[in-house]
Amino acid sequence: MNSAAKDFVTLLANASSLGLVFKTNLFVGKEPTTPNDTVTLFDGVSSAPQLTLTKGEDYFYDAVQIRIRNMDYNTGYALAKGIMGVLHGLGQQTVNNTLYSVIYCSNGPAPLGWDDNGRIIFVLNFEVQRR
């Protein structure tokens, strides 16, 4: 099973309306210094897995934080809302051999402020149920 952040890369890269390309402007785990406009996904703090009587049918409750960095406030905000539109409420979707029962945005987009290079940073937080 991949990390949920890695699976989200697949979902976002396949959403042609977002214009995200893995290792060009879409990254996992480490935000590069360039380019200026990026989307980086991080695995977040998750809840304990649900145990069932039948081992192997457990559900995992994972979290993913998506960080959007952009030179323009409105463009960054619009991208954050676009990402939320693609992911929020997605369910019964198999990604890289993992069944996602539900994906939902738990908060965001929230502006974190501007970095030292004049780029606005937004974050979105998602929670998932998968097995």
Image: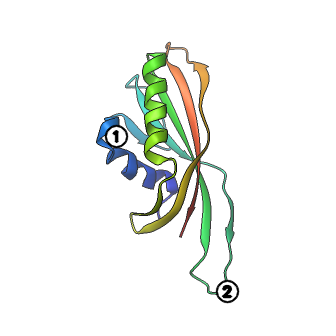
What color scheme is it?
rainbow
Image point 49% across, 17% down: which residue?
73
Callout 1 secondary element: loop
On the picture, is 128 further left or further right than 119? right
On the picture, is 95 further left or further right than 66? left
Of circles 1 and 2, the one toward us is 2
Residue 78, horizontal then vertical, whole percent: 45, 26
**Residue wearing tag 1:** 23
Image point 38% across, 45% down: which residue?
12
Callout 2 secondary element: loop
Image point 45% across, 53% down: which residue?
6
Separation of residues labelled 1 and 2 (CA atoms)? 41 Å
On the picture, is 18 further left or further right than 57? left
Amino acid at circle 2: Leu
Q: Residues within 10 Å of mark 2 (few under 14, many from 20)?
A: few
**Residue wearing tag 2:** 53
Q: Please give the label number shown on residue 121.
A: none
3 relative to 82, above or below: below
Q: Are marks 1 and 2 in contact (CB under 8 Å)?
A: no
Q: Residues within 10 Å of mark 1 (few under 14, many from 20)?
A: few
22 relative to 75, above or below: below
Which of the 4 image quarters holds residue 47? bottom right
